[in-house]
Amino acid sequence: MTKLVSFVIPCYRSEQTIGKVVEEINRTMKSLTQYRYEIVLINDASPDGTFETIRKLCAGQKNICGVNLAKNFGQHAALMAGFQYTKGDIVVCLDDDGQTPADEAGKLLAEIEAGTDVVYARYSHKQHSGFRNLGSKVNELMTRVMLGKPRELYISSYFAARRFVVDEILRYENPFPYVIGLVLRTTKNISNVDVTHRERMIGTSGYTLGKLLGLWFNGFTAFSIKPLRIATVIGVISACGGFLYGIYTIIKKLLMPAVPVGFSALMAAVVFFCGLILLMLGMIGEYLGRVYISMNNSPQYVIRESIDERNKNEGNDES
Protein backbone atom coordinates (compact mmCIF):
# COMPACT_ATOMS: atom_id res chain seq x y z
CA MET A 1 0.00 0.00 0.00
CA THR A 2 1.34 3.45 -0.93
CA LYS A 3 2.31 5.74 1.93
CA LEU A 4 0.33 8.89 2.65
CA VAL A 5 2.22 12.19 2.88
CA SER A 6 0.61 15.10 4.76
CA PHE A 7 1.68 18.63 3.83
CA VAL A 8 1.06 21.14 6.64
CA ILE A 9 1.19 24.84 5.73
CA PRO A 10 0.56 27.67 8.26
CA CYS A 11 -0.89 30.64 6.36
CA TYR A 12 -0.76 34.36 7.16
CA ARG A 13 -1.31 37.14 4.63
CA SER A 14 -0.90 34.65 1.81
CA GLU A 15 -4.07 35.01 -0.26
CA GLN A 16 -1.92 35.70 -3.35
CA THR A 17 0.69 32.98 -2.79
CA ILE A 18 -0.90 29.94 -1.16
CA GLY A 19 -2.66 28.87 -4.36
CA LYS A 20 0.67 28.73 -6.20
CA VAL A 21 2.24 26.69 -3.39
CA VAL A 22 -0.64 24.17 -3.56
CA GLU A 23 -0.30 23.97 -7.35
CA GLU A 24 3.42 23.24 -6.99
CA ILE A 25 2.71 20.47 -4.49
CA ASN A 26 0.17 18.95 -6.90
CA ARG A 27 2.68 19.01 -9.77
CA THR A 28 5.45 17.57 -7.65
CA MET A 29 3.43 14.72 -6.19
CA LYS A 30 2.27 13.61 -9.65
CA SER A 31 5.85 12.57 -10.32
CA LEU A 32 6.18 10.83 -6.93
CA THR A 33 3.72 8.06 -7.77
CA GLN A 34 4.81 5.91 -4.84
CA TYR A 35 2.97 8.30 -2.48
CA ARG A 36 -0.54 9.49 -1.88
CA TYR A 37 -0.83 12.97 -0.37
CA GLU A 38 -3.05 15.43 1.45
CA ILE A 39 -2.66 19.14 2.20
CA VAL A 40 -3.65 20.84 5.48
CA LEU A 41 -3.84 24.65 5.31
CA ILE A 42 -4.09 26.59 8.59
CA ASN A 43 -5.13 30.23 8.47
CA ASP A 44 -3.60 31.95 11.50
CA ALA A 45 -6.31 34.64 11.66
CA SER A 46 -4.89 36.46 8.66
CA PRO A 47 -6.46 39.93 8.23
CA ASP A 48 -6.69 39.58 4.44
CA GLY A 49 -8.68 37.11 2.36
CA THR A 50 -6.42 34.14 3.01
CA PHE A 51 -9.14 31.88 4.38
CA GLU A 52 -11.48 32.67 1.47
CA THR A 53 -8.67 31.55 -0.82
CA ILE A 54 -8.27 28.39 1.26
CA ARG A 55 -12.03 27.81 1.04
CA LYS A 56 -11.83 27.93 -2.76
CA LEU A 57 -8.85 25.56 -2.78
CA CYS A 58 -10.77 23.07 -0.63
CA ALA A 59 -13.95 23.21 -2.76
CA GLY A 60 -14.52 19.81 -4.34
CA GLN A 61 -11.07 18.53 -3.32
CA LYS A 62 -10.85 15.28 -1.38
CA ASN A 63 -7.26 15.78 -0.27
CA ILE A 64 -7.21 19.41 0.95
CA CYS A 65 -8.27 20.46 4.43
CA GLY A 66 -8.66 24.07 5.62
CA VAL A 67 -8.53 25.25 9.24
CA ASN A 68 -9.35 28.79 10.39
CA LEU A 69 -8.00 29.85 13.81
CA ALA A 70 -10.04 32.27 15.91
CA LYS A 71 -7.10 34.63 16.48
CA ASN A 72 -3.41 34.88 15.66
CA PHE A 73 -1.64 32.23 17.77
CA GLY A 74 1.67 32.14 15.89
CA GLN A 75 3.33 29.77 13.45
CA HIS A 76 4.12 27.00 15.93
CA ALA A 77 0.60 26.91 17.36
CA ALA A 78 -0.72 26.81 13.80
CA LEU A 79 1.53 23.83 13.11
CA MET A 80 0.17 22.06 16.17
CA ALA A 81 -3.37 22.67 14.94
CA GLY A 82 -2.43 21.33 11.52
CA PHE A 83 -0.85 18.20 12.99
CA GLN A 84 -4.21 17.32 14.55
CA TYR A 85 -5.70 17.04 11.06
CA THR A 86 -2.94 14.99 9.47
CA LYS A 87 -3.33 11.31 8.68
CA GLY A 88 -0.08 10.73 6.80
CA ASP A 89 2.73 8.29 7.47
CA ILE A 90 5.08 11.21 6.78
CA VAL A 91 4.34 14.86 7.58
CA VAL A 92 6.00 17.66 5.60
CA CYS A 93 5.86 21.25 6.87
CA LEU A 94 6.59 24.23 4.63
CA ASP A 95 5.87 27.95 4.28
CA ASP A 96 3.00 29.68 2.51
CA ASP A 97 5.09 32.27 0.63
CA GLY A 98 6.80 30.00 -1.91
CA GLN A 99 10.28 30.46 -0.44
CA THR A 100 10.45 26.81 0.61
CA PRO A 101 10.57 24.85 -2.69
CA ALA A 102 7.73 22.32 -2.73
CA ASP A 103 9.19 20.81 -5.89
CA GLU A 104 12.14 19.55 -3.83
CA ALA A 105 9.96 17.69 -1.32
CA GLY A 106 11.19 14.46 -2.87
CA LYS A 107 14.62 15.09 -1.30
CA LEU A 108 13.09 15.21 2.17
CA LEU A 109 10.98 12.12 1.53
CA ALA A 110 13.98 10.19 0.23
CA GLU A 111 15.93 11.04 3.38
CA ILE A 112 13.05 9.80 5.55
CA GLU A 113 12.92 6.58 3.54
CA ALA A 114 16.66 6.20 4.13
CA GLY A 115 15.97 5.84 7.85
CA THR A 116 15.96 9.37 9.30
CA ASP A 117 13.20 10.26 11.76
CA VAL A 118 13.20 14.00 10.97
CA VAL A 119 14.91 15.84 8.11
CA TYR A 120 15.31 19.62 7.82
CA ALA A 121 15.95 21.53 4.61
CA ARG A 122 19.30 23.32 4.64
CA TYR A 123 19.91 26.47 2.59
CA SER A 124 23.33 27.57 1.38
CA HIS A 125 21.97 31.10 1.00
CA LYS A 126 18.72 32.37 2.48
CA GLN A 127 16.69 34.97 0.60
CA HIS A 128 15.58 36.74 3.78
CA SER A 129 16.10 40.31 4.93
CA GLY A 130 19.09 41.10 7.13
CA PHE A 131 16.79 41.41 10.16
CA ARG A 132 15.23 37.99 9.57
CA ASN A 133 18.63 36.38 9.00
CA LEU A 134 19.86 37.89 12.27
CA GLY A 135 16.80 36.45 13.99
CA SER A 136 17.56 33.02 12.53
CA LYS A 137 21.14 33.18 13.81
CA VAL A 138 19.97 34.12 17.31
CA ASN A 139 17.41 31.31 17.19
CA GLU A 140 20.12 28.86 16.09
CA LEU A 141 22.34 29.92 19.00
CA MET A 142 19.44 29.64 21.46
CA THR A 143 18.49 26.12 20.35
CA ARG A 144 22.11 25.00 20.51
CA VAL A 145 22.85 26.43 23.96
CA MET A 146 19.47 25.98 25.65
CA LEU A 147 18.03 22.90 23.92
CA GLY A 148 21.13 20.92 23.09
CA LYS A 149 20.85 21.10 19.31
CA PRO A 150 23.96 19.66 17.62
CA ARG A 151 26.15 22.40 16.15
CA GLU A 152 26.15 20.82 12.69
CA LEU A 153 22.35 20.47 12.50
CA TYR A 154 20.60 23.19 10.47
CA ILE A 155 17.05 24.04 11.58
CA SER A 156 14.46 25.54 9.22
CA SER A 157 10.70 25.79 8.76
CA TYR A 158 10.84 23.25 5.90
CA PHE A 159 11.07 19.74 7.32
CA ALA A 160 9.62 16.24 7.19
CA ALA A 161 8.94 13.87 10.08
CA ARG A 162 7.77 10.33 10.60
CA ARG A 163 4.31 9.67 12.03
CA PHE A 164 5.53 8.61 15.47
CA VAL A 165 7.41 11.91 15.86
CA VAL A 166 4.26 13.92 15.09
CA ASP A 167 2.20 11.77 17.46
CA GLU A 168 4.74 12.42 20.22
CA ILE A 169 4.66 16.17 19.48
CA LEU A 170 0.87 16.13 19.81
CA ARG A 171 1.19 14.80 23.35
CA TYR A 172 2.27 18.31 24.32
CA GLU A 173 -0.96 20.07 25.27
CA ASN A 174 0.33 23.13 27.12
CA PRO A 175 0.37 26.68 25.71
CA PHE A 176 3.50 28.20 24.13
CA PRO A 177 4.39 25.27 21.83
CA TYR A 178 7.83 25.27 20.24
CA VAL A 179 8.01 22.59 17.57
CA ILE A 180 11.81 22.52 17.34
CA GLY A 181 12.07 21.83 21.06
CA LEU A 182 9.46 19.09 20.79
CA VAL A 183 11.36 17.46 17.93
CA LEU A 184 14.70 17.61 19.76
CA ARG A 185 13.25 15.97 22.85
CA THR A 186 11.63 13.21 20.78
CA THR A 187 14.54 11.95 18.66
CA LYS A 188 18.21 12.48 17.91
CA ASN A 189 17.96 10.78 14.51
CA ILE A 190 17.75 14.09 12.62
CA SER A 191 19.51 15.05 9.40
CA ASN A 192 19.71 17.75 6.71
CA VAL A 193 19.27 17.86 2.94
CA ASP A 194 20.29 20.78 0.75
CA VAL A 195 17.54 22.67 -1.07
CA THR A 196 17.23 26.06 -2.76
CA HIS A 197 15.78 28.99 -0.84
CA ARG A 198 13.78 31.28 -3.12
CA GLU A 199 12.94 34.94 -3.12
CA ARG A 200 9.62 35.70 -1.48
CA MET A 201 6.83 35.84 -4.09
CA ILE A 202 5.16 38.92 -2.65
CA GLY A 203 5.02 40.97 0.56
CA THR A 204 7.28 40.77 3.60
CA SER A 205 7.78 38.38 6.47
CA GLY A 206 5.13 38.36 9.19
CA TYR A 207 7.80 37.98 11.87
CA THR A 208 8.30 41.19 13.83
CA LEU A 209 10.86 41.76 16.58
CA GLY A 210 8.15 41.12 19.17
CA LYS A 211 7.15 37.81 17.58
CA LEU A 212 10.77 36.67 17.34
CA LEU A 213 11.37 37.51 21.00
CA GLY A 214 8.20 35.64 21.95
CA LEU A 215 9.36 32.63 19.95
CA TRP A 216 12.75 32.59 21.68
CA PHE A 217 11.11 32.86 25.10
CA ASN A 218 8.83 29.96 24.21
CA GLY A 219 11.83 27.89 23.26
CA PHE A 220 14.00 28.24 26.32
CA THR A 221 11.34 28.62 29.02
CA ALA A 222 9.19 25.69 27.87
CA PHE A 223 11.96 23.16 27.26
CA SER A 224 15.01 24.19 29.28
CA ILE A 225 15.95 25.25 32.81
CA LYS A 226 19.39 26.43 31.73
CA PRO A 227 18.42 30.14 32.03
CA LEU A 228 17.72 29.56 35.73
CA ARG A 229 21.03 27.77 36.14
CA ILE A 230 22.82 30.59 34.31
CA ALA A 231 21.12 33.09 36.62
CA THR A 232 22.32 31.07 39.62
CA VAL A 233 25.90 31.04 38.34
CA ILE A 234 25.79 34.79 37.67
CA GLY A 235 24.43 35.32 41.18
CA VAL A 236 27.24 33.29 42.73
CA ILE A 237 29.90 35.11 40.68
CA SER A 238 28.41 38.49 41.58
CA ALA A 239 28.21 37.61 45.26
CA CYS A 240 31.85 36.48 45.24
CA GLY A 241 32.83 39.63 43.39
CA GLY A 242 31.01 41.80 45.91
CA PHE A 243 32.62 39.96 48.82
CA LEU A 244 36.11 40.32 47.36
CA TYR A 245 35.50 43.98 46.61
CA GLY A 246 34.42 44.48 50.22
CA ILE A 247 37.64 42.89 51.48
CA TYR A 248 39.65 45.07 49.08
CA THR A 249 37.90 48.19 50.40
CA ILE A 250 38.64 47.28 54.04
CA ILE A 251 42.30 46.54 53.33
CA LYS A 252 42.62 49.74 51.32
CA LYS A 253 41.13 51.74 54.20
CA LEU A 254 43.49 50.13 56.73
CA LEU A 255 46.60 50.67 54.63
CA MET A 256 45.66 54.12 53.31
CA PRO A 257 43.29 55.74 55.82
CA ALA A 258 43.66 59.14 54.16
CA VAL A 259 42.15 57.90 50.89
CA PRO A 260 38.34 58.36 50.97
CA VAL A 261 36.11 55.50 49.87
CA GLY A 262 34.34 56.77 46.81
CA PHE A 263 30.58 57.29 46.92
CA SER A 264 30.35 56.77 43.16
CA ALA A 265 31.99 53.35 43.44
CA LEU A 266 29.46 52.39 46.13
CA MET A 267 26.51 53.51 44.04
CA ALA A 268 27.85 51.72 40.96
CA ALA A 269 28.10 48.49 42.93
CA VAL A 270 24.59 48.93 44.38
CA VAL A 271 23.04 49.61 40.99
CA PHE A 272 24.91 46.69 39.40
CA PHE A 273 23.87 44.12 41.99
CA CYS A 274 20.31 45.40 42.23
CA GLY A 275 20.05 45.09 38.47
CA LEU A 276 21.24 41.48 38.63
CA ILE A 277 18.71 40.68 41.35
CA LEU A 278 15.86 42.18 39.33
CA LEU A 279 17.00 40.29 36.23
CA MET A 280 16.99 36.98 38.08
CA LEU A 281 13.64 37.69 39.72
CA GLY A 282 12.23 38.52 36.30
CA MET A 283 13.50 35.22 34.92
CA ILE A 284 11.93 33.29 37.79
CA GLY A 285 8.71 35.26 37.33
CA GLU A 286 8.63 34.33 33.64
CA TYR A 287 8.78 30.65 34.52
CA LEU A 288 6.17 30.98 37.27
CA GLY A 289 3.88 32.96 34.97
CA ARG A 290 4.01 30.26 32.32
CA VAL A 291 3.32 27.57 34.92
CA TYR A 292 0.30 29.60 36.08
CA ILE A 293 -0.99 29.98 32.53
CA SER A 294 -0.53 26.25 31.91
CA MET A 295 -2.44 25.41 35.09
CA ASN A 296 -5.32 27.57 33.84
CA ASN A 297 -5.49 25.40 30.70
CA SER A 298 -4.80 28.27 28.33
CA PRO A 299 -5.30 26.84 24.82
CA GLN A 300 -2.54 26.44 22.24
CA TYR A 301 -5.05 27.52 19.61
CA VAL A 302 -8.79 27.91 19.06
CA ILE A 303 -10.38 26.71 15.82
CA ARG A 304 -13.16 28.91 14.48
CA GLU A 305 -13.96 26.78 11.44
CA SER A 306 -12.63 23.84 9.48
CA ILE A 307 -13.28 22.58 5.97
CA ASP A 308 -12.50 18.91 5.55
CA GLU A 309 -13.84 17.19 2.45
CA ARG A 310 -11.88 14.09 3.43
CA ASN A 311 -14.39 13.33 6.17
CA LYS A 312 -17.22 13.07 3.69
CA ASN A 313 -15.71 9.85 2.45
CA GLU A 314 -16.24 8.54 5.97
CA GLY A 315 -19.79 9.80 6.29
CA ASN A 316 -19.00 12.94 8.21
CA ASP A 317 -20.21 16.46 7.43
CA GLU A 318 -18.12 19.57 7.09
CA SER A 319 -17.47 20.98 10.53
Image (cartoon, grey):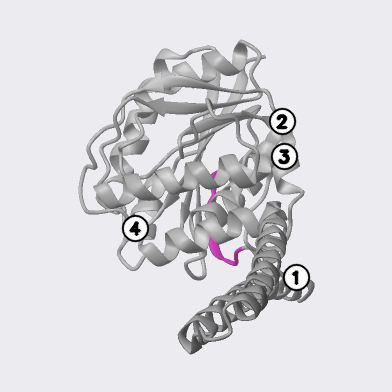
Per the picture, the main secondary structure of the magenta-coloured stretch is strand
Distance in Å between CA atoms under marks 4 and 2: 30 Å
Q: Residue at x 70, y 71 (%)?
A: 243
Q: Are marks 4 and 2 in contact (CB under 8 Å)?
A: no
Q: Which residue is mark 1?
A: 291
Distance in Å between CA atoms under marks 3 and 1: 19 Å
Q: Quick one: label 3, few (<14), some, or many (20+) residues within 10 Å?
A: some
Q: Are marks 3 and 4 in contact (CB under 8 Å)?
A: no
Q: Confirm whether the magenta stretch covers residue 108.
A: no
Q: Confirm whether the magenta stretch covers residue 307.
A: yes
Q: Residue 88 in the image: state x and y as whole percent.
A: 63, 31
Disc 2 marks a residue whose amino acid type is: Thr
Q: Which is closer to the viewer, label 1 or label 4?
A: 1
As drawn, the label of residue 187 is 2
Disc 3 marks a residue whose amino acid type is: Arg
**Where does the magenta region start and end?**
301-309
Is residue 65 in sight in this rendering?
yes
Mark 1 or mark 4: whose residue is earlier in sequence:
4
Q: Quick one: label 1, few (<14), some, or many (20+) residues within 10 Å?
A: some
Left or right of 51: which side holds 72?
A: right
